[in-house]
Image: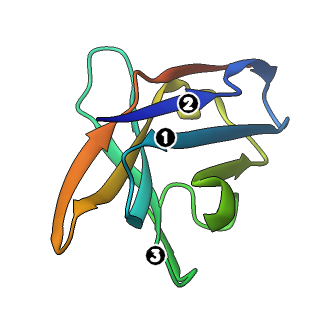
Amino acid sequence: QVQVAESGGGLVQAGGSLRLSCAASGSIVRLSDMSWYRQPTGKQREWVATITSAGRSAYGDSVLGRFTISRDNAKNTVYLQMNSLKPEDTAVYYCNAAVVEVAPYEYDYWGQGTQVTVSS
């Protein structure tokens, strides 16, 4: 079994910064892509960023230039550094991990989410 847990959410003023962390644990042979998504209240879940096991990253248009995704493969952890936060960044942020438990099969695991609230 695999567990994915986010941390680091909270309340911040517009223009401020937050750093989210997401750790995967359990029966992990290898972690493939790790991603962040977010879901504002009453809206659909939105892709934020992805980082591959080799460290290549991609970002959604709404966060490009403000957010940075990184990972520590030794710790099975992905981070999301969020700068220049805006009220529209307010959402529950979810971590997604593509996990190989039995090669070569990958399965997606989701965390429970962490709330980020940006006040104006």
SS type, badge 2: strand
Residue underneath mark 2: 6
Tell me which corner region of the image, top left, top right, bottom left or bottom right, holds residue 109: top left
Which sits earlier in the primary sequence, circle 2 or circle 1?
Answer: 2
Task: Residue 60: give x, y in percent of width and height.
Answer: 44, 62
Q: Nearer the viewer, mark 3 or mark 1?
A: 1
Pick out the residue farthest to the left.
Answer: 105
Which sits earlier in the primary sequence, circle 3 or circle 1?
Answer: 1
Q: Nearer the viewer, residue 54 or 37?
A: 54
What amino acid type should be assigned to the residue bearing mark 1?
Ser
Residue at image position (66%, 54%) is 75
In the displayed structure, would residue 101 be above or below residue 117? below
Q: CA distance from mark 3 to mark 1?
A: 18 Å
Residue at image position (37%, 51%) is 97
Quarter of the image that includes the N terminus: top left
Q: Nearer the viewer, residue 115 or 41?
A: 115
Q: Nearer the viewer, mark 2 or mark 1?
A: 1
Residue at image position (26%, 25%) is 43
Q: Would you say 119 lies left or right of 71 here? A: right
What amino acid type should be assigned to the residue bearing mark 3?
Thr
Label disc, if present, on residue 52 of the rendered structure:
3
Tell me which corner region of the image, top left, top right, bottom left or bottom right, holds residue 22: top right
Q: Nearer the viewer, residue 83 or 108?
A: 108
Classify mark 2: residues with Cα within 10 Å, few (<14), some (14-19) or many (20+): many
Q: Would you say 34 lies left or right of 22 here? A: left
Residue underneath mark 1: 25
- Can residue 70 be seen from the camera position used here? no
SS type, badge 3: loop
Task: Residue 64: give x, y in percent of width and height.
Answer: 58, 66
